[in-house]
Image: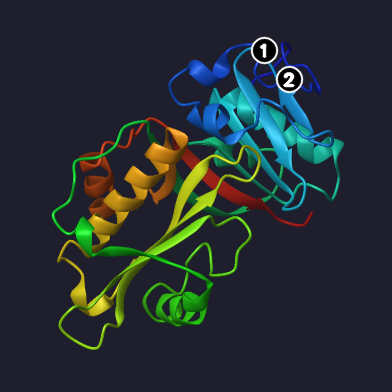
């Protein structure tokens, strides 16, 4: 990794250099609160910025991969035992791995939109769900999306929505949630799932379109995470207007 002499070891202001407006830095633009909590720890320089989610031991970083990796390494050395995982621009895992043991790397795309999508023909089938449906939602997610990121009852979720089978017993056939990015509170679509037997019928597209529209109307934007190798999701989110400019990698720091 190249030396990074410009980097300030620690700063409370992640936004002083305007990095959030550059392509590939939307995670900073939408994911980090401009009015930080008193205990947020951040690092920034001319071409990278990083901040710590202390509860998870997770460092978020954006910018040039070399510089972002340098901030992650600096954070891990400066806060021993407190940094357990990180997300950074694509390739950061390899660069960090030259200095620290890295494991479990997964490539993602952080996607976002400021516009309402075209109306999907099946959006009228989407209904909002409340606490009385949490048990049903959990059972559905456990069956059709066991690795779901957010579950019913999560304090981060502002809305659950679903689609029911109109021709059968009214059972749930698709669901999804509007959650929030932890630091900024920006809307994050999460845990969208479709009955495995009914995939390919546009249910997920209708639900995703509905949730996106709801978030944009309420907050002016919507964000989501997409696995980099999920081609069907790639096509759907592109069709709905989600930008694809922020390829990321997430990984853990192995004990050393």
What is the spatial separation of the Cα atoms under label 1 and label 2, in whole angstroms?
Answer: 6 Å
* Element at label 2: loop
| Crowd band around label 1 with a 10 angstrom C-alpha radius: few (<14), some (14–19), many (20+) | few
- Residue 72 appears left or right of 206: right
Above or below residue 212? Residue 161 is below
Residue 58 left/right relative to 121? right
Could you tell whether 31 is left or right of 229 in the image? right
Image coords of residue 187 (percent x, y)? 50, 44
According to the image, label 1 marks what residue? Answer: 16
The residue at 81%/23% (across/down) is: 10
Say which residue appears at 67% left-offset and 30% top-offset. 50
Dot 2 alpha-carbon crowd within 10 angstroms: few under 14, some 14 to 19, many 20 or more: some
Classify the position of the N terminus by image quarter: top right
Residue 58 is marked as: none
- The way the protein has been coloured in the rendering is rainbow
Q: Quadrant of the C terminus?
A: bottom right
Picture coordinates of residue 18, whole percent (x, y)? 58, 12
Front residue of 2 and 201: 201
Q: Is residue 38 above or below residue 206?
A: above
Q: Position of residue 132 (x, y in %)?
A: 50, 77
Numbered disc 1: secondary structure? loop
Residue under the image location 69 percent in, 17 percent down = 4
Q: Decide if residue 50 is in sight here.
A: yes
Residue 13, disc: 2
Res. 110 visible in picture: no
Please, which residue is most extreme toward the bottom here? 169
Q: Is residue 166 above or below residue 91?
A: below
Q: Residue at x 62, y 37 (%)?
A: 184
- State which quadrant residue 60 falls in: top right
Determine contact: label 1, label 2, CB under 8 Å: yes
Count up the numbered dots. 2
């Amino acid at each position: 990794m190249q030396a990074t002499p410009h980097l300030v070891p620690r700063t409370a202001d992640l936004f002083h250099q305007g990095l959030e407006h550059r392509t590939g830095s939307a995670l900073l633009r939408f994911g980090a609160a401009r009015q930080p909590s008193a205990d947020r720890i951040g690092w920034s320089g001319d071409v990278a910025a990083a901040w710590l989610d202390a509860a998870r031991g997770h460092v978020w970083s954006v910018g040039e991969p070399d510089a972002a990796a340098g901030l992650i390494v600096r954070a891990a050395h400066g806060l021993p035992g407190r940094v357990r995982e990180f997300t950074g621009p694509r390739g950061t895992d390899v660069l960090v791995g030259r200095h620290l043991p890295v494991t479990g790397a997964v490539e993602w795309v952080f996607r976002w939109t400021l516009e309402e999508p075209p109306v999907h023909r099946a959006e009228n089938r989407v209904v909002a769900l409340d606490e009385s449906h949490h048990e049903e939602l959990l059972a559905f997610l456990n069956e059709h999306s066991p690795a779901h990121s957010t579950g019913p009852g999560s304090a981060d979720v502002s809305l659950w929505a679903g689609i029911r089978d109109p021709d059968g017993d009214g059972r749930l056939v698709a669901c999804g949630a509007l959650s929030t990015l932890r630091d900024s509170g920006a809307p994050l679509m999460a845990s969208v799932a479709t009955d495995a037997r009914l995939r390919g019928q546009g249910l997920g597209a209708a639900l995703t379109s509905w949730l996106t529209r709801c978030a944009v109307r309420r907050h002016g934007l919507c964000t989501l995470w997409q696995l980099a190798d999920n081609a069907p999701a790639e096509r759907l989110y592109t069709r709905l207007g989600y930008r694809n400019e922020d390829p990321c990698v997430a990984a853990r720091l192995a004990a050393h």
